[in-house]
Image (tube, rainbow, N blue to C red):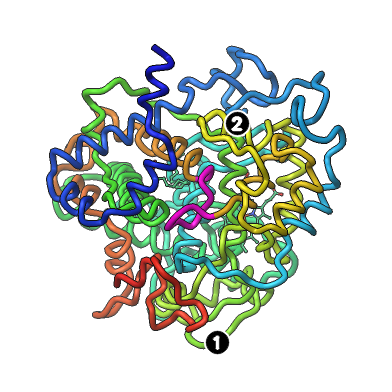
Amino acid sequence: MQRLRRLLKPNPETLHHLLVNYKWLWSIINSVTFLSDSLMTFVYLLRSNAVDSPPLYTSAHEYITLEASYNLSYYARGLPAVPTDCPTPMGIKGKRVLPDPKIVVERLFKRTVFKPEPMHSSLLLAYFAQHFIHQFFKTDHQKGPGFQWGGHGVDVSHVYGKNKHVENLLRSFQDGKLKTQVLNNEEYPPYQADVPGVPMTWMGQVADNNKFALGHQFFGMMPGLFLYATIWMREHNRVCDELRRVHPEWDDERLFQTGKLIIQGETIKIVIEDYVQHLSNYHFLVTFKPELLHTEVFQYQNRIAAEFDHMYRWHPLMPDEFNISGVVYPIMEFIFKSDLVVKYGTKVFTDSLSRQIAGQMTARNHGFLTQSVALDTIENGRKLRFQPYNNYRKNLDFPHTKFSELTDDPEVAATLEELYGDIDGVEFYAGLLSEKRRENNMFGALVIEMGGPFSVKGLMSTPICSPRYWKPSTFGGDVGFNIVKTASLEKLFCKNIPGDECPLISFVVPPENIPSSEKCENCKNDEL
Ligand code: HEM
Ligand SMILES: CCCCC/C=C\C/C=C\C/C=C\CCCCCCC(=O)O
């Protein structure tokens, strides 16, 4: 039976090839609801069934424990840790002593020349990713790399704060809204000085007019994160106005709580239909339809895995300089400068981020500011005794047999061989970052094949997707339910940026902003 199932299971590469080609076929499937819904249900189930739920392992034991299920302070594990009594750090294959992590960074991760993202993804995409994921990737550095302090899912804590105390500090307690202030005729989050007690992390000297009180303590670090924080804050308040219009009798508390449910729904809708759609580059239109799972067997619970956190360290996306309306800021003049958003305004800032290409997710493309994060990732992957990169591929039935299969850059292949000796001895993050790019895609195959299951499972298992939540009354009636069901990235920005005309709001840089040296075949923008 097992063998038959294996035989019938679609090969990941074949499936991917089908999904990113044959546009005509997909346009037919997309237009027939019965077909697209059936396929979407298949995607939800195929992907989420690949994740252990409830989780089986943490980094503390390489065998099943009850702790894995009950102790939420651990990250879960995709694959169990390599037992400590194995002959090599990677198990049985590979070198007995792994290369110095500094050498790995120097030879495999360090950027010498900026490599632009071949699908022409924009910085608006890169910041969307960073803003969204920090709500659930929260390593507890005090306890160690196997531990976390988050809520294991899309709990919108990056908008409302890590706990009730912070949430209360950010709330105005009037009409359900969050606190704001007006700067340059636009609404922004309050200064930290005006909301004492909201924890924010600053490094070095940061001027007071750059210190805002935000839902996540790191979000003062990058103006792009501050832009998203501002837009979501405005959206929450806009939603509260809509709710008050239909429920004038509701008090502040009900408006706030219902607004928060709608923001979570909008987040998931935008993540699936704008963001995952872009990352997958499928011609099949992926949809957010929780009702499709209501007749299936599905567990409404999620746990973040340590490997997912490492896999998502997409630091090569970040360039070394940022072009805002024609002015070029080197990264050191950009970090901790939230007031640049205030200076240019949300409209110009959004437009500029939509017109600049992010960096390619590949080897030797970590800018100098994030090389230390790569170092940390390698060191922590070892402390967590991650299985080798190829075991994660074996687990999905598509292992590599030689280095030249892993990467099509012979220089990188030779470096990997020199550093790790054996294709089964390559450590997880080094393999992921060196992987050759998949056909018509931003990433190597393992990012999609591992990320897909963790993502689908995490998104569809939020409580609002479950049968007893997913109904109009949860969201304040049809008005609120429709806001969720019709949310899009474009609307999110457009409805919250003042002025009659919207800026460019795009995860893909338009052709006119692509330098001629960068034109490519099969890029999304060729179709615009
Ligand atoms: C220039 C921009 C960025 C800087 C300066 C930066 C910096 C950092 C730093 C200092 C850490 C903590 C590392 C540690 O554990 O020692 C971190 C963690 C992380 N970053 Fe970034 N980052 C940037 C952009 C991004 C982007 C674009 C993404 C993904 C889309 C990303 C994803 C992550 C993830 C997943 C973690 C792990 C979080 C955790 O485990 O708590 N970062 N980053
Ligand atoms: C805890 C919730 C996690 C939600 C994460 C949501 C989105 C993550 C997006 C990307 C993860 C990385 C790669 C997957 C990208 C494409 C997946 C395509 C859909 C699929 O084939 O399953």
- Indicate which disc, 2 or 1, sits on the residue closer to the N terminus: 2
Q: Can residue 153 be seen by looking at this rendering?
A: yes
Q: Residues within 10 Å of mark 1 (few under 14, many from 20)?
A: few
The residue at the point 35 percent across, 70 percent down is 505
Indicate the amino acid at tag 2.
Tyr
Residue 467 on the magenta segment = no
Image spot of residue 439 (x, y percent): 45, 54
Indicate the amino acid at tag 1.
Val
Q: Main secondary structure of the magenta part?
A: loop
Using the image as rendered, state which of residue 212 and residue 265 is in the foreground: 265
Q: Residues within 10 Å of mark 2 (few under 14, many from 20)?
A: many
The residue at the point 55 percent across, 19 percent down is 56
Image spot of residue 21 (x, y percent): 32, 54
Using the image as rendered, state which of residue 293 and residue 103 is in the foreground: 103
| Residue designated by label 2 | 75
Q: What are the residue bounds of the magenta stretch?
A: 437-447
Position of 443 relative to 317 (above/below): above
Image spot of residue 468 (x, y percent): 24, 26
- Residue 504, by quadrant, is bottom left
Using the image as rendered, state which of residue 83 and residue 175 is in the foreground: 83
410 on left or right of 457: right
Q: Secondary structure at mark 2?
A: loop
Query: Which mark, by number, is residue 327?
Result: 1
The residue at the point 79 percent across, 41 percent down is 421
Image spot of residue 197 (x, y percent): 59, 51
